[in-house]
Image (cartoon, rainbow, N blue to C red):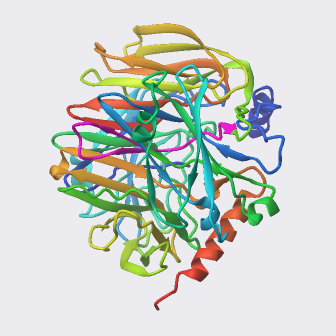
Amino acid sequence: MSYFPILKAPHCSGQTTLYNFSPNNWESVYKRSQTINLSYTDGVYWHTSPLGELAYGDYKVVNYQDIKRFLPDNALPLLSLSHNKLDEKSKELPKIVCNQTNVPDHRSTLNLISQYSATSYQGELNPFPPKASLLTFSPFLQFDNEVENFLLFLNIEKKAENRKVKVEIFDAKTKALKCEKSASSNNITIISLDDCGFSKNDLPVVISREMSGIPLYFSCANQGEFLSLEHTHPPASLVVHGDRFAAQKHLKNYWFSQLKNYD
Amino acid sequence: MINLLKKVKKIPWILGQRLTKKPRNSQSAISDLFVWRCNQDWDTYFELLDLASLFGEKGNHQVDIVFFDNNGDKFHQQIIELNGPCRKVLDISKLLSALSQLPSEYGTFSIFHKTIPNSILKFQSFIAERGYASYQQKNSPLRSYIHGNLDAIDDSLTPLSGSSFFKRTYNLQYLLETNKDYEIFLINANLKSKKINFTIVGFDNSIKMNKNIVIKSKQVFLLPIKNLSSPSRLIIASKIVMARPVIYSFQGNDVNVFHG
C-alpha cells in the first residue's frame, strides 16, 4: 500500500513521476490502467480525489504547482495508483489496492527541482506505526561557502492528525545535545542543520523517541545551483541475515539510553 | 485463493534464489561493491563510520579497504584506522592517486570492518558496510551522495549475490529524458559471469538501444546514454536476482547520483 509524496525543500519545487509498469517480470501485477489519486490531511480527515487515469506501460509527471490549488497550505501531497476507488473523506489513510512488488519495491521518482538543477531518489512511502521511533547517523553535512544543509523529515501514519514530536540532534562522540527541533506527522518537516554547531568531524545522531519517518538529507549550494539529496539507512541495515531487527532494537536501546532525554 | 495462486506462481522464482547468500564463515564481514571514479573530472569520497563503536564496542577499530578495477580484478588493499563515533570522510581519489598508476578510471571498492560486535554475533547476523559514497565533479561545490545497496561480497572476497534460474528483467522505474545525459553502472556480484541485455525503450515503444554484454564476477560495466530522441526507460535482462544499477544523471553543471 505505497504512497508517493511530492517533496519540498528550500529553493526547490517538488515533482513526482509515477509509473504504471512493474519493476520486474516475475511478481504478478495488474496490467491495466490505474487511477492516479491525490490525498492529503487537514489534521482531522484524509481527503482524496482522483487526478486521472494512467495507462499500463505509461508514466505521469506531477508537479507541486499542478496540484497545489487542491491542498491547504503546508499539507503534504500524497499520490497513489490504485485499482479501487478511494473514499473522498476518511479518518484513516485510504487502503489502496495496487500493484505491489518486493524485489524491488514499486517506486516512483521523487524529484526536487530548482531553476538550475534537479536531484531525486527512487522512493515510496508506507504508513509508519504510531508507536515507533527513529535513530539515524547522518554524515551528510557539507561545509563549503554558500552551502545550506537540511533534514527533511518525512512521515505518514494511518490517522489523519498532525501530531507534533520532538526531534533531538546529538553529537555521537560527546553525546551532547546540539539542537532540538519539532516535526509533524503526515508531513515533510524541513529542519535546518546549519545552526546546530556541527563541525566537519562530528557525526550527528538524529533521534525521535515518539515517531518514525524517512530522514532525507538535502544540501544546496548557491541558492539551488547545485543540489544533493539522499536518505540514511535504518539501523537494521548495518547488519544482514540473522535477527536484523533484534540488532536494530539493540542499537536503539543503546543509543536512546546514552542520549539524555532533556524533558 | 488468488493470493495462494500468486504465491505458488512465485515459487520457481524464489526457491533457492536468495538475493544475498550467507558467507561460509559466521564471523565474516560483508560489504557493498561501491563505485569509485577517479580522473580529471571526478573525485570520489566515502563516509567511513566506525560501526563497531556504534554498537557500543570500546577500543580502536580498523577496516580493510579493497579496490577492484573495472574488470573486477583486485589491485590495492590497505588497512585504515577508525576514530570511534566520529565522522571520517575518506578521500578515495587522494588515496588512489598515491598509487603509481591506476588500472582504470573507474572500478569498485569494498570496506570490511575488522571488529565484529558481540551483539551482532549473538543475533547470528553479519556486519555490513552499506554506507555512503559521494561523487564530486571538479567544478562543483557539492558532493552527490548515494547509499550502499547490495550486500555484495564477504571479506574472503567471495561474491554473495544469488543467481536466478530464469532470466529476469529489472524494469527501471525512472524516466530517461531527452535533455539529459546518463551513465548507468551495473555490477556483477555473482560468483560467475553473467550475460546482460540492456534495452532502452521509448514510451512510444520504439527501441532506442539494444546491447548484449557479458560481465565477469565483480566486474562493473558502464553504459552511457546520450541524445535520446524521446522519453524512454531502461530494461536490464539477466539471471541476476536483482540487477539494480547505479545511475548518474547530468544536468547543467550538476550531477544526480542514485540507485535504481
Residue A11: image location, x then y, percent = 19, 53
Residue found at the very far bottom of the displayed protein: A263
Residue A38: image location, x then y, percent = 37, 49
Q: Is residue B37 left or right of residue A248?
A: left
Q: Based on the displayed image, in which of its 4 quarters is residue A100 positioned?
A: top right
At 42% from the left and 24% from the top, the residue drawn is B105
Of the pair A7 and A193, the residue shown nearer to us: A193
Q: Is residue B245 above or below residue B210?
A: below
At 36% from the left and 78% from the top, the residue drawn is A179
Q: Is residue A240 above or below residue A43?
A: above
Q: Based on the displayed image, in which of its 4 quarters is residue B124 positioned?
A: bottom right
Of the pair B205 and B93, the residue shown nearer to us: B93
Residue A14: image location, x then y, percent = 28, 48
For the image shown, how many numbered marks are present on the structure?
0
The answer to whether residue B22 is magenta is: no
Residue A175: image location, x then y, percent = 49, 79
At 45% from the left and 25% from the top, the residue drawn is B101
Residue found at the very far front of the displayed protein: B100
* Residue stretch in magenta: B134-153
Q: Is residue B77 left or right of residue A91?
A: right
